Amino acid sequence: MLVVAIAVVAAIVELVACDAVLAQGRTEYLVRMLRTSSQFRVRLQAALSLGALGDRAAVPALADALRDDEAAVRAAAAASLERLGDPNPTAITNLRALSRDPEASVQAAARRALRALEQAARASPSVPTTPTRPPAGGGGGGGGSSRYYVGLGNMGSKVSGVSAATLARLRDVMRANVSGMSGVVMAPDRESNGSATRVIRDRRLTGFYLDGALTSLGPSGGGLRAEVSVIVGTYPGRDIRVMLRGAATVQGVDISTASARQQAESQAIEAAVRSALRRLGGAFESSAATARAP
């Protein structure tokens, strides 16, 4: 029945391309539906559509959807990840767990996707696929070996009027940038403290947790400027270690209409996030060194 359900939904998936999608951007809209809809058929359609669009910005949301309560959504997310072929470490970790799903069709979809992503990872050796223990007596593992286990919180805003979709997009940008860093393995969302502690202990990783906030957004010098802060804490304890700040101004933008302003805001916020995260590797390294010090 699950295979039939997916086939039927695949046939009507283009119906998702409504006016709201065109206004907000198809990927952003579908990611929001996948993350927030209470109706599993909507989440199922969104998961399938994201694979059809071919936008790898959807990979973090699809990786999270592998833990959905509905088997059909889990299978659809796995199929879309296989189609996108992005060797995202969190996706690979979640697919390994999903390959033992009680639903046989979900298992099959997960194993196909896992083979595809592991093959892609082998072709891109800088992408960590399995947490690797550092050499005996050494510190971190250099190169592509995994050193940090990173949890990601929700994004906040000190700016009024910022939509939930914008904050969700901001979180996706953070996840995409952090998961692409050498040595990083992303923790699954809503992971228990006990589970995180076991992973960090067994794999000899250093745990960090990231919280972010949009602190300022508005016109500046003929453009639109965004400022963000990223708090780096321990994981799972979440004791604050350092705060990173980033800012970016998009020049020559048209903010005369609501849709144009929304697009400019999104561009400025994403650039500000990338600005803050440029110093994240150094923050990880210095914090880990401090923790190792006697």
Image: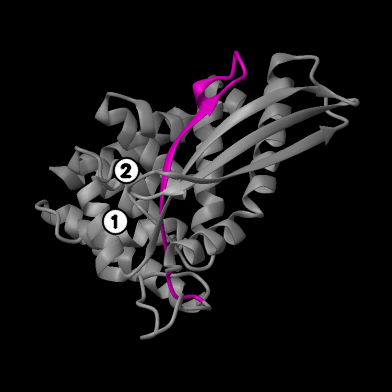
Position of 258 relative to 13 (above/below)? above
56 lies left or right of 246: left
Labels 2 & 1 near each other (Cβ < 8 A):
no
Q: Is residue 64 above or below residue 127?
A: above
Left/right placement of residue 64 relative to residue 179 reads left
Q: In the image, what residue occupies the spot 37% across and 66% down?
A: 205
Q: Which mark is residue 65?
A: 2
- Image vertical order of residue 245 relative to residue 137, above or below: above
Displayed quadrant of residue 16: top left
* Front residue of 160 and 279: 279
Task: Give the distance between the C-alpha atoms of the residues marked 2 and 1, in whole angstroms.
Answer: 9 Å
The way the protein has been coloured in the rendering is one colour
Query: Which of the pair 66/157 is nearer the observer?
Result: 157
Q: Earlier in the sequence, mark 2 or mark 1?
A: 2
Q: Secondary structure at mark 1?
A: helix
Q: Nearest the camera: 161 or 27? A: 161
x and y percent of residue 15 in the render? 43, 28
Counting from the top left corner in percent of width and height, residue 191 is at: 27, 46
**Who's the residue at 64% across and 27% down the image?**
215
Which residue in the protein does label 1 denote? 94
Asked which secondary structure carries label 2, the reply is helix
For residue 266, side relative to residue 289 (left or right): right
Quadrant assignment for the C terminus = bottom left
Residue 51 point in image, percent of width and height: 43, 48
Is 157 covered by the magenta stretch?
A: yes
Residue name at image x 69 percent, y 41 percent: 246
Amino acid type at image mark 1: Asn
Instruction: Give the residue furthest to the front.
Output: 294
Three-letter code, disc 2: Ala
| Residues in magenta, as a range | 144-165
